[in-house]
């Protein structure tokens, strides 16, 4: 049935197209066949809608939507463009890329992918070969460029890939927290209430209703903590690793661990036992601010619970030792006996998920030339890509060689990376910049071409949800001349001479995704648009049954076959093998002199429900809920500075300053602040356009293993304007 015929019916079931989560919804149309509103699909458990989905009509038809290709007419740094045709745009791209390749080699070209590239077909079919998870694009690999970069250098990879794999041999995608059977739930560095959609919050509330205890470890008393009536354990940002080590020390000292498991299935326990002796609860209290008695009580509860599940995401990634802090929590869970047991942190059964097709993926043509390879070898190893933190040095200083052209797809470097002035200089110094997005970004001011992309409502594709495969059907026709991100890259590949390597139309995308699954596109359509594969019965302690290793042998999928408390992979690259704690270098303990002028611990990046990073600040309905960026500070800290709730304030760091509106509350740890990020785009009110929080952060401060910038442990001061 055509889109027009469906629209005449006034409603239909579909997949939400606002973000990559892919919630199942019912779409209502107005009399003209335009998208009117969404509501959750009540006929399926995946039916849901968030605040952004409720404003889908405004987002899709926003006055800020890009509707045609644009070519620069004014100086860089301005937004002066003229409309051109797609043919002219592609011809210019090919001409410039070919010229740069001829003059400087293919490595002088690069592509950066942001969250706008998370549409599943993009991740599945463009990701580098032999990589477990990636949103990076291989479109320039056949061209000869090793330089695919992306937002993975900022998010997810520490928590979901590096830390679990070097420790347990598994990754976030093949693990889950068994909240439905947990007696104790620790929400640590996460706030599921702001997830899109908040499914984990719903699971937590259901667990609470049946009697589970909930503890939230966070500098803020979050909406999740309040909704679940959880015990709140406030902690100084960046010290989570010390807390995990102290809790592990209690479990070891009091003999609450499984001695047989430690003897047979772990590597490095004795060294770890000696190391954690320096992290007594009393010592950890001086570091974290968590009382020693609370630390002991939490450790005992964790070890004695009949099923304890963590809910964690990226809150621990952005400190001086984010990878090691996350590893410390994983070791803690294992020692507490809560790994792969009912109610614990579990491995999925092999064959539980609908299989992605990896047969057509392309390998990076020359990883040795990838930017940042020498500085962050483990990141490159897990992602098959360059590290974006190395881009400014390449463009501005020619080290190790100069990147001359860049495609930015669904990303915003200037608003997401530290020190926007550095990134503005970087983008301005490029010979050729293309931005592909749904609206103008800060990066577009320096672009030679801006190309309009569709939302998820305007394309045909697919989604996978564990064992489920569902077709994404087009809900409305593309606005103006907007095109699918996937097909923009596929057409670029075709014009560069290797289009046969990527699907060139939407039906081919789905057929490619289904290869090897046992289903055809026609069979999925005949089944009502979605199918579900049979899943194996759950078994626990999988390391005992040969269910974690590809060779079928007992053990963990690590080099030693054991849970590596002392990681052989980290050691081989010159890092500390144990999950060591590193005190934040720009913090009140490590740098007391700086703390005299900047006494507050800076924290940013916490999600809100009314935007996603720099997206949606031009949507009137969402702006009513959050008209300007805010900074949260404790009542005591505000009073000491003469700041009242609602005052306009200036946040200063050694690097810069921004102005925001103050939220004064007891729901944050004294001595810490939390500031909104995502400001600095050319779209939205002046308060948002002028408040790029990364004016305060530092591109020279990062986790040495992952290269992730430090967004949560720096120092600042707040003063009334």
Image (spheres, grey):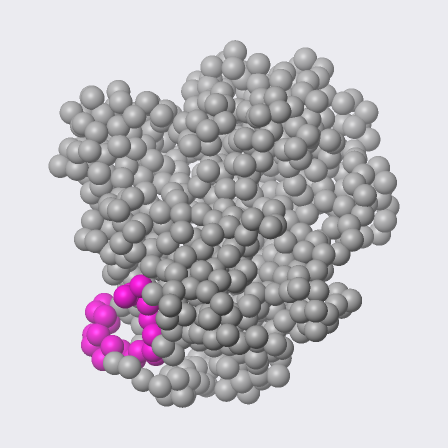
Residue 529, horizontal then vertical, whole percent? 64, 65
Q: Camera-side residue: 560 or 176?
A: 176
Tell me where the magenta segment starts and ends, as one range.
62-81
Residue 99 can be seen, yes or no: no
Residue 102, horizontal then vertical, whole percent? 46, 86
Above or below 280: residue 531: below
Residue displayed at 55% across by 87% down: 497
Q: Camera-side residue: 204 or 350?
A: 204
Among the 4 quarters of the image, the one containing residue 592: top left
Residue displayed at 28% across by 57% down: 618
Residue 43, horizontal then vertical, whole percent? 60, 50
Q: Main secondary structure of the magenta part?
A: loop
The verdict on residue 63 being magenta is yes
Residue displayed at 64% across by 49% down: 173
Quadrant in which the C terminus appears: top left
Among the 4 quarters of the image, the one containing residue 83: bottom left
Residue 577, horizontal then vertical, whole percent? 63, 38
Q: For this view, does 24 lie left or right of residue 621?
A: right
Residue displayed at 72% across by 41% down: 347
The verdict on residue 301 being magenta is no
Q: For this view, does 370 lie left or right of residue 423?
A: right
Above or below 187: residue 3: below
């Amino acid at each position: 049935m055509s889109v027009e015929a469906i629209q005449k019916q006034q409603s239909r079931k579909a997949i939400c197209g606002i973000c990559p989560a892919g919630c199942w919804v019912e779409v209502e149309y107005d009399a003209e066949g335009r998208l009117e509103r969404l509501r959750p699909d009540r006929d399926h458990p995946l039916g849901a809608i968030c605040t952004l989905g409720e404003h889908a009509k405004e987002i899709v038809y926003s006055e800020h939507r890009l509707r045609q290709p644009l070519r620069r007419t004014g100086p860089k740094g301005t937004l002066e463009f003229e409309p051109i045709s797609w043919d002219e745009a592609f011809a210019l791209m090919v001409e410039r890329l070919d010229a740069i390749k001829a003059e400087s080699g293919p490595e002088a070209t690069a592509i950066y992918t942001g969250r706008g590239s998370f549409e599943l077909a993009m991740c599945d079919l463009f990701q580098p070969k032999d990589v477990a998870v990636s949103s990076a694009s291989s479109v320039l690999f056949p061209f000869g460029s090793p330089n695919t970069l992306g937002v993975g250098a900022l998010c997810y990879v520490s928590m979901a890939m590096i830390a679990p794999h070097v420790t347990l041999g598994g990754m976030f995608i093949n693990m889950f927290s068994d909240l439905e059977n947990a007696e104790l739930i620790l929400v640590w560095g996460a706030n599921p209430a702001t997830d899109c959609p908040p499914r984990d919050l719903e699971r937590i509330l259901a667990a609470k209703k049946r009697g589970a205890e909930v503890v939230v470890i966070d500098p803020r008393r979050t909406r999740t903590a309040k909704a679940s009536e959880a015990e709140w354990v406030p902690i100084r940002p960046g010290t989570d690793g010390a807390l995990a080590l102290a809790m592990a020390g209690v479990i070891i000292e009091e003999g609450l661990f499984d001695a047989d498991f430690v003897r047979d299935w772990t590597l490095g326990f004795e060294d770890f036992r000696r190391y954690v002796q320096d992290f007594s609860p009393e010592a950890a209290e001086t570091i974290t601010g968590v009382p020693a008695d609370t630390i002991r009580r939490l450790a005992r509860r964790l070890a004695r619970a009949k099923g304890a599940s963590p809910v964690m995401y990226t809150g621990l990634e952005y400190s001086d030792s984010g990878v090691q802090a996350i590893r410390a929590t994983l070791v803690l869970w294992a020692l507490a006996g809560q790994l792969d047991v009912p109610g614990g942190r579990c491995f999925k059964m092999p064959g539980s998920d609908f299989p992605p097709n990896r047969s057509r993926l392309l390998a990076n043509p020359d990883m040795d030339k990838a930017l940042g390879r020498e500085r962050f070898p483990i990141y490159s190893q897990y992602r098959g890509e360059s590290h974006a933190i190395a881009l400014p040095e390449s463009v501005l200083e020619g080290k190790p060689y100069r990147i001359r052209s860049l495609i930015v797809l669904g990303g915003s470097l200037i608003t997401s990376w530290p020190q926007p002035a550095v990134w503005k200089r970087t983008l301005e110094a490029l010979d050729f910049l293309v931005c592909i997005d749904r609206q103008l970004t800060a990066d577009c001011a320096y672009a030679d071409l801006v190309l309009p992309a569709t939302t998820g409502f305007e394309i045909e594709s697919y989604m996978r949800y564990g064992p489920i495969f569902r077709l994404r059907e087009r809900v409305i026709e593309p606005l103006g001349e907007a095109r699918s991100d996937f097909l923009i890259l596929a057409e670029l590949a075709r014009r560069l001479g290797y289009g046969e390597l990527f699907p060139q139309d939407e039906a081919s995308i789905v057929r490619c995704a289904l290869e090897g699954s046992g289903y055809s596109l026609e069979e999925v359509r005949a089944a009502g648009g979605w199918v579900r594969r049979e899943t194996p019965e759950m078994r626990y302690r999988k390391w005992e049954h040969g269910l974690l290793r590809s060779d079928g042998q007992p053990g963990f999928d690590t080099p030693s076959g054991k849970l590596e408390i002392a990681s052989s992979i980290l050691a081989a690259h010159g890092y500390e093998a144990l999950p060591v704690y590193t005190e934040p270098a720009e913090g009140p303990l490590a740098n007391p002199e700086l703390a005299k002028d900047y006494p507050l611990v800076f924290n940013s990046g916490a999600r809100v429900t009314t935007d996603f990073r720099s997206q949606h600040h031009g949507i009137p309905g969402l702006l009513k809920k959050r008209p300007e960026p805010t900074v949260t500070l404790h009542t005591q800290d505000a009073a000491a500075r003469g700041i009242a709730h609602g005052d306009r304030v200036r946040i200063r760091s050694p690097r810069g300053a921004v102005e925001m509106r103050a939220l004064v509350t007891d729901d944050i740890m004294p001595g810490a602040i939390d500031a909104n990020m995502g400001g600095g785009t050319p779209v939205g009110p002046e308060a948002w356009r002028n408040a790029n929080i990364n004016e305060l952060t530092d591109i020279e401060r990062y986790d040495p293993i992952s290269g992730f910038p430090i967004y949560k442990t720096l120092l600042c001061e707040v003063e009334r304007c």
